[in-house]
Amino acid sequence: MARTRLQNDDLPGDSAYGCMTPLARLAYLHMRCIMDDRGVHPAKPADLKGKCLPYDPVTVPECQGIAEQIVSAGFWHIWDTRRSP
């Protein structure tokens, strides 16, 4: 079943969102479209490039930095599924 992903109206005025680069903001919004129903997606820079920024002049290693920006801003959380809590 298709899901509607709504964005918070306050996001454009959020200072943490505004401190990210334009590509990081775009990647964040695009990732919301492809994550699963629990809001989860593997943290793979190649996926970020291929699925969220395919037409943008950014390399896979640069996508790692973009992901780190989004994590630092508090919009994404990364955890290792191979380790027990």
Image (spheres, rainbow, N blue to C red):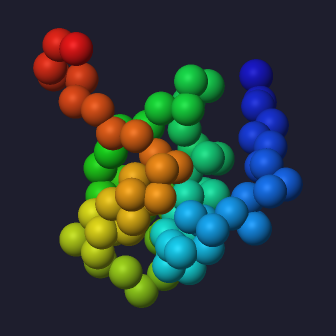
Along the horizontal axis of the image, is 44 left or right of 57? left
Using the rendered image of the protein, determine whether residue 26 is visible from the camera's viewpoint.
no
Task: Determine the residue located farthest toward the left in the rendered image.
Answer: 83
- Seen in the picture, residue 72 relative to 63 is either above or below; the reply is above
Residue 65 in percent (x, y) is at 30, 69
Where 57 sits versus 27, above or below?
A: below
Taking the spot 16% from the left edge, 22% from the top edge, the residue there is 82
Of residue 10 and residue 36, the one placed in the foreground of this image is 10
- Whether residue 24 is visible: yes
Q: In the image, residue 7 lies at what x, y percent?
A: 77, 49
Task: Kindly identify the residue that appears in the image at 77 percent across and 30 percent down.
Answer: 2
| x and y, in percent, of residue 67 in the image | 37, 59
Q: Which residue: 24% across, 23% down? A: 81
Task: Write the residue at 29% across / 75% down.
Answer: 62
Frontmost residue, 51 versus 31: 31
Give x and y (percent) for residue 55.
51, 78
